[in-house]
């Protein structure tokens, strides 16, 4: 039987030590990679949580801003609807065109965020605007039929419209007004640039 030479006997422990050191290095690298992946997952979770919080805060601020503006606009629209209902009752003796335009300008001054206030009769024909031509009702408010057909309907916020000649997208707030007999008299709309809310 051949006995291992002294050189071979010395090489065997070295190989074991080399293999052991290699295994330790591989295990250390795997542990570092696992820690790195865990750290990345925690960072991603933290960033997602911060983004979610920021989004919720922004949505809350936007909701409050929109609600506050909508309340102010609705109060103005109710007052205007009452005036136009009285105008329908009083006929031409109640308000002439200059008085109506002055009243619209006064309300516009109370609502600085608005682009304009527009009034349409029961057929959707333009009557008055505090600035420029009232335009066509469908260019301002797609909710004319909804307001005409539902006497109990209150404030309606229409879809944003991008009217030519305007400064970007506009958000219409509209309310119906009635004749003295309770029938539909028309609508009054307040137009607000969408950028006001951004």
Image (cartoon, grey):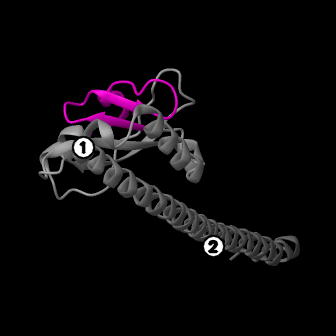
Q: Is residue 170 above or below residue 63?
A: above
Q: Which residues are magenta?
A: 117-143
Task: Find disc 1 in the rendering and name its residue.
Answer: 88
Task: Find disc 2 in the rendering and name its residue.
Answer: 42
On the image, which quarter does residue 149 sit in?
Answer: top left
The x, y position of residue 171, in whole percent, is 44, 42
Q: Residue lying at the far front in this picture: please name it.
A: 93
Q: Is residue 68 above or below residue 182?
A: below
On the image, which quarter does residue 186 sit in?
Answer: top left
Q: Is residue 198 visible?
A: no
Q: Classify mark 1: residues with Cα within 10 Å, few (<14), some (14-19) or many (20+).
A: some
Residue 91 is left or right of residue 28, and the answer is left
**Residue drawn 63% across and 73% down?**
42
Magenta segment: does it hold 138?
yes
**Residue drawn 68% across and 71% down?**
39
Q: CA distance from mark 1 to mark 2?
A: 67 Å
Quarter of the figure with the N terminus: bottom right
């Amino acid at each position: 039987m051949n006995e291992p030479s002294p050189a071979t006997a010395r090489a065997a422990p070295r190989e074991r030590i080399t293999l052991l050191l290699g295994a330790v290095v591989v295990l250390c690298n795997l542990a570092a990679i696992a820690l790195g992946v865990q750290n990345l997952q925690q960072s991603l979770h933290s960033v997602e949580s911060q983004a979610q919080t920021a989004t919720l805060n922004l949505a809350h601020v936007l909701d409050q801003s929109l609600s506050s503006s909508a309340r102010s606009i609705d109060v103005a629209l109710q007052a205007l609807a009452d005036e136009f209902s009285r105008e329908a009752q009083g006929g031409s003796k109640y308000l002439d065109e200059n008085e109506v335009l002055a009243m619209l300008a006064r309300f516009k001054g109370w609502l600085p965020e608005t682009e304009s206030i527009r009034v349409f009769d029961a057929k959707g024909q333009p009557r008055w605007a505090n600035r420029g031509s009232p335009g066509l009702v469908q260019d301002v408010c797609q909710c004319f039929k909804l307001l005409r057909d539902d006497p109990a309907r209150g404030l309606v916020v229409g879809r944003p419209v991008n009217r030519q000649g305007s400064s970007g997208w506009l958000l219409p707030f509209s309310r119906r007004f009635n004749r003295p007999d309770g029938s539909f008299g028309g609508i009054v709309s307040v137009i607000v640039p969408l950028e006001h809310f951004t």
